[in-house]
Amino acid sequence: MIEKIAAFQNALLKWHLSSARDLPWRGEEDPYKIWISEIMLQQTRTETVKGYYQRFLQAFPNVFALANAEESEVLKLWEGLGYYSRARNLHAAAKIVAYQRKGNFPCTFEGLKELPGVGDYAAGAIASIAFGAKEPALDGNQARVLSRVLGITEVIKSPAALYDRALALVPKGDPGEYNQALMGLGAMICVPKNPKCGSCPVREMCISFREGMQSEIPKKPEKLKRRMEKRAVALVIDDKGRVFVQKRTGGMLIGLWEFPGFTDARTIKDAEVCLEEMGFLVEPIREIGNAKHVFTHLEWHMTGYLFRSVRAPESSVFEDKAGVLALAMPTAIKAYRDYYLEGKTDDI
Ligand code: SF4
C-alpha cells in the first residue's frame, strides 16, 4: 500500500491545477451536464466528445428537455459517436429523473447506478464530481495508473477489483477534483505505452517507477492457448443436385446453418460411418480439400468430403444453390459452401 497518501494526493492535485486540460465540462457542477459528459466519454476520445457535448446541451439544456425529446432527435445528435445504447439509456434515465424524481439526480454511488446506462465508473465520477462523494471513478484508465503507482504485479481482471485500494487514496476534500486529476494523468502522462515518468508529478511515490517496472504493469492476462480441432465436413448431394444442410441447435454458432461436421472422423470412410449413424446411406465420391478457421479459443482444421445421398433420413433438408445462398452460414465453412455454389459438385 502506498505509504504517503497525502503526498500523493497533494502532488496530483497541484499538477492538475497547473496543467488541467481545457475541457468544456471542466469546473461544471450541474449533475445533468456532468452525467452527459461522463456517458459520452465512455469508449470515445475526449477530442471527439467536445463538439458533441456542446451540440447536445444546446439541444437539451436540462434533464426535462432531454426527457421530453423524441428518441429519434436524441439518436440524430448522437450520430457518429457510436455505441448507440448509450444514447437510448441517457434518454430512458432522463425520463426517470424528470418524471419520477422531479428533476433530482440520485446523489449516491448506489442510487446513480440504478439509472439505465450508469455503471461503476460513471456512478463514481458523477457522485464525486457533482456531489462530493468519496468514491473513485474506476475505469481502465484509472486502473492502469493506480496499478503502476501501487506496483500491483498481479493480473487485474476488471477495474472493480481495485475498488478498495482506489477508495483508500481518494481524499475526503474534493474527491471530484482528485478523480479528474487522476483521469488527466492517465490521459496525458501515465499513458498505456511509454509512460512519461520524467514529467510525472507522482513519480516519487510511484512503486513501478522506483522498481523500473512501468512497462510490465498493468500485467496483461496470459493469452489462452487455442485448441486445435480436426474436423471432417460432409457435402451430401441428393439426386436433384441439392446439398444437405442442418441448423446448429446448441453451443457455438447456434442458429446458423451448416454442412454436417465430425470431430472424430479422419478419413472419408470415417465420415461415411458418421453419416450412417445419422441415418444416411451414402456413396463416397472424393475428398474436396482442406480449410482452416480460427475462432478466439479454437482452430478448426477441416477436410471436406463429397458424398452422393442414396437414402436420407426423413425430414432432412436439402437446398439448391439459391436456397444455400439465402441461409445464414458460418464463415468457417465458406470454402465448402463456395465449392457447392461454384458448381463443383454438379458432376455427380
Ligand atoms: S511515474 Fe510513470 S508509471 Fe508511475 S504514475 Fe507516473 S507516469 Fe505512471
Image (cartoon, helix red, strand yellow):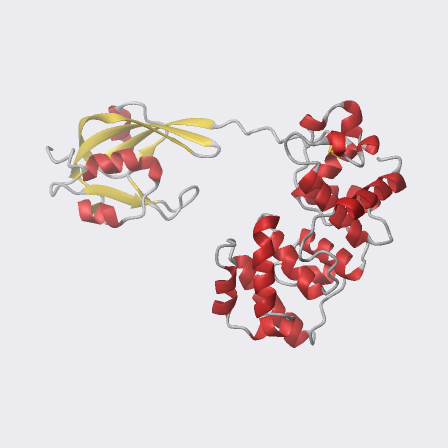
Estimate the x, y position of residue 1 in percent, counting from the top left: 84, 35
Q: Which residue is drawn at 72% across and 38% down?
A: 145
In the drawing, does residue 174 fall left or right of residue 115?
right
How many marks can you see?
A: 0
User: Which of 336/91 is in front?
Assistant: 91
Image x and y of residue 186, in percent: 70, 40
Q: Position of residue 239 (x, y in %)?
A: 11, 41
Residue 241 spot, x, y in % from top left? 13, 41
Residue 174: image quadrant is bottom right
Q: Nearer the viewer, residue 39 or 235?
A: 39
Q: Is residue 109 visible?
A: no
Q: In which quarter of the image is residue 208?
A: top right
Q: Which quadrant is the C terminus positioned in? A: top left
**Relative horizontal placement of residue 189, taking residue 226 as reference (left or right):** right
Name which residue lies at 53% across and 58% down: 85
Q: Quick check: can you spot residue 234?
A: yes
Does 343 sit above or below residue 250? above
Ligand 1: which quarter? top right
Residue at 77 percent of width and 56 percent of height: 128
- Residue at x 66% of width, y 71% of height: 97
Residue situated in front as seen by the camera: 54 or 187: 54
Q: Answer with left or right where residue 188 lies relative to residue 281.
A: right
